[in-house]
Amino acid sequence: MKKITIAIDGFSSCGKSTMAKDLAREIGYIYIDSGAMYRAVTLYCLRHGLFHGDEVDTDHLKTALPHLNISFKLNPETGRPQTYLDGALVEDDIRTLAVSSKVSIVAALDFVREAMVSLQQQMGREKGIVMDGRDIGTTVFPDAELKIFVTASPEIRARRRYDELQAKGEEGSYEEILENVKERDRIDTSRTVSPLRKADDAIELDNSHMTISEQKEWLAAQFRKATEAE
Ligand SMILES: Nc1ncnc2c1ncn2[C@@H]1O[C@H](COP(=O)(O)OP(=O)(O)O)[C@@H](O)[C@H]1O
Ligand SMILES: Nc1ccn([C@@H]2O[C@H](COP(=O)(O)OP(=O)(O)O)[C@@H](O)[C@H]2O)c(=O)n1
């Protein structure tokens, strides 16, 4: 069967990567978490003291960015992809609230977006890819055959992320996480370069009241429809 490109965009913490990963594994496609790439750049900035409040030392970052090596490798035990920064596993380090609270600032920088989008397009040039993020259907793969835009209420999203961080033993109150979810949505939708928005041809899914397995079924059905149409 001819392989297609699948773009899954939407607001923070609504379940995009959960559904994207499951689908990719089931249909044998590559899964790329584009948010992990912006998170890895943010981790680099934090580790190298490039933040002054909410300002980033862009001169330093511009020089460093071409030399940063962001890659994904499958965890042999779980079969799930994990993020590496300059050869070191950073999957847990990029998911902390410290990174979440700065990532949207870094992701709004035009030169950072340019570099990440170019890497993402290279990763998807053979098709057979599921990528999730904010601008995949609008900027990275505007010709994707299947585009999904996911939403859920901020309170529900914050609850999901809170439960996830608690299970990992991470810091962070529900209120802090809700604040972060809302603030990232605000920055992501209002930035100048590739703001978060639904592509005109994307199918919208509000999964506020859906279980993980219901949304998985829903996405599998959308995939069947899209490939039948090919
Ligand atoms: N429909 C759902 N119901 C409840 N929890 C969900 C649902 N979808 C995803 N989750 C959980 O919510 C959290 C955020 O999901 P994730 O896929 O990381 O979101 P995103 O990629 O949109 O940021 C995860 O802990 C995930 O297990
Ligand atoms: N394609 C993308 C993906 C993420 N991002 C940025 O990276 C941040 C983290 O993305 P993410 O997908 O890991 O966010 P979560 O919703 O998983 O918390 C987002 O809040 C955006 O600021 C982006 O700008 N463009």
Image: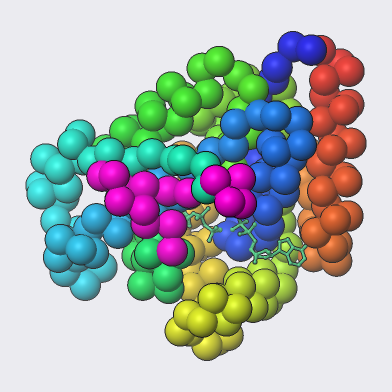
Q: Is residue 215 above or below residue 53?
A: above
* Figure quadrant of the N terminus: top right
Res 80 visible: no
Instruction: Say which residue appears at 61% left-offset and 45% top-offset.
Output: 79
Q: Nearer the viewer, residue 166 or 122?
A: 166
| Image coords of residue 93 (percent x, y) | 38, 64
Residue 139 magenta-drawn?
Answer: no
Q: Name the spot of residue 204 as percent of width and height, x first.
A: 77, 45
- Where is residue 13 shown, x and y percent of the image? 61, 62
Q: Where ligand 1 lies, by quadrant?
A: bottom right
226 sits left or right of 187 in the view? right
| Visible residue check, residue 93 | yes
Q: Which residues are magenta?
A: 76-92
Above or below, comparing residue 208 to residue 135 in the picture: below
| Residue at (20, 34) in percent of width and height | 66
Can you give x and y, in whole percent of width and height, for residue 7 in the image? 64, 34
Q: Is residue 89 one of those drawn in magenta? A: yes
Label total for image: 0
* Foreground of the two, 37 or 29: 29
Residue drawn where x is 82% and y is 24% of the image: 226
Residue drawn at x 88%, y 46% is: 217
Place residue 101 in its image quadrant. Answer: bottom left
The one nearer the camera, 180 or 201, is 180
- The answer to which quarter of the image holds residue 86 is top left
Specify the quadrant of the image occupied by residue 192: top left
Give the left or right position of residue 172, taking residue 24 as reference: left
